[in-house]
Amino acid sequence: MAMPGSTRRREFRVGVVIVGLVLLIATGCAVVMLVTPETGAETVSTNLELPDEWRSVHGVREVTAVDESRRIPGDNFGEADSWEHSVRLEVTLEGDLSGPEAAEAGREVLRLLEPEIARLVPEAGPDRTSASFAIGSAENWVGASGLDPLDAVDDALADAVALREAGATSVSLSASQPQTKDPGKADVRAPKDALVQIATVARSRQRPVDLFGGHAWYRSNDVPDPIAVKLVVDASARPSVTTAQLSAPYDPLTVLVEAAEGDRVLDDVSRWLTAYDGYPGRSGQPLAYVVQGTRGGMVEGWVGGVRRP
């Protein structure tokens, strides 16, 4: 059967596809069709033809919108197949935009294109529409759903630029968390020496982050504690340490050391952590640590020698 609404986009199909991925090229349009032989389910990806108004938006380099149409076979004999639509909007922003400029560009391009997408693919709806923004490159990425408030998208774009300016080499985040609509967590990679500054910026902007740099790894579903991040960075710099990681606020600091059971370096790192000056952090809660050897051995204790009551 023909796909409903096929007149609103340029597309065509050739032959019968048994299995695999086929790329069909039409004038000004690309269609990708995938068929699963076991179920007969078919997915068609079609580039939407958008008006050119977005080209006047400062800082927008490229825009692509794709209609992902999935054919769902009828359950009963004689029942007509149905089509399920979702739309993916991909926006590339210039890499030299400031945070406010990126936020303004994102807001304006959504203002211009969301009504047009709703006209072209009314079956998708906000709950089946998503947008992604690459800021200069795919290394700096912000995702949003059609249900996210524009203010959340603005904040996410501005935060991504701020984190990059603080030293991040890679930032990926969602505008908001699907269930709570709180700010989405950013996944950030950076040189080890930039992690504390990035944590400070993220905290000031109330943006949860996961941080990774060098041998240091900090994870939290809340806004970061720069003091705790500094502890992880400092621990990762100790001799023979291969990894220092903290999943705040519930797990202990875990420090992996190139050592075997009984090696002196395990006790050296443990004594350093027990004597560490500068903890507890903002939470005021004592933090346990575990020092583990890569070839066996483990030492436990409390950072700064401050035990939990």
Image (spheres, helix red, strand yellow):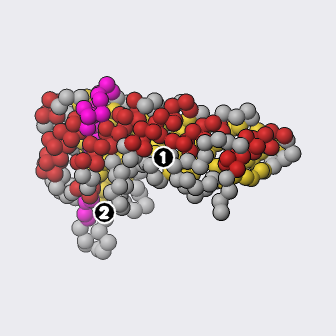
Asked if residue 134 lies left or right of residue 65, the reply is right
Q: CA distance from mark 2 to mark 1?
A: 44 Å
Considering the numbered disc 2 on the image, is that residue within a helix, a strand or a loop? strand
Q: Is residue 84 magenta?
A: yes
Q: Which residue is mark 2?
A: 72
Front-most of residues 174 and 84: 174
Asked where in the image residue 123 lies, by quadrant, the reply is bottom left
Residue 262 in picture, x, y percent from top left: 87, 45
Magenta region: 81-103
- 25 above or below 151? above
Considering the numbered disc 1 on the image, is that residue within a helix, a strand or a loop? loop
Whether residue 149 is visible here, answered yes or no, is: yes
Residue 38 in picture, x, y percent from top left: 43, 61
Asked where in the image residue 48 lies, by quadrant, the reply is top left
Asked if residue 259 lies left or right of residue 30, the reply is right
Residue 161 in picture, x, y percent from top left: 35, 34
Amino acid type at circle 2 is Ile
Asked if residue 281 lies left or right of residue 17, the reply is right
Asked where in the image residue 234 lies, by quadrant, the reply is top right
Q: Is residue 244 magenta?
A: no
Q: Is the C terminus in the top left, top right, bottom left or bottom right quadrant?
A: bottom right
Q: Which residue is mark 1?
A: 224
Mark 2 vs mark 1, foreground winner is 1
Q: Residues within 10 Å of mark 2 (few under 14, many from 20)?
A: some
Amino acid type at circle 1 is Pro
Instruction: Say which residue appears at 31% left-offset and 38% top-offset.
Output: 158
The earlier-in-sequence mark between 2 and 1 is 2
Q: Is the N terminus in the top left, top right, bottom left or bottom right quadrant?
A: bottom left
Q: Which mark is residue 233?
A: none
Instruction: Say which residue appears at 45% left-offset and 32% top-offset.
Output: 168
Whether residue 16 is visible here, answered yes or no, is: no
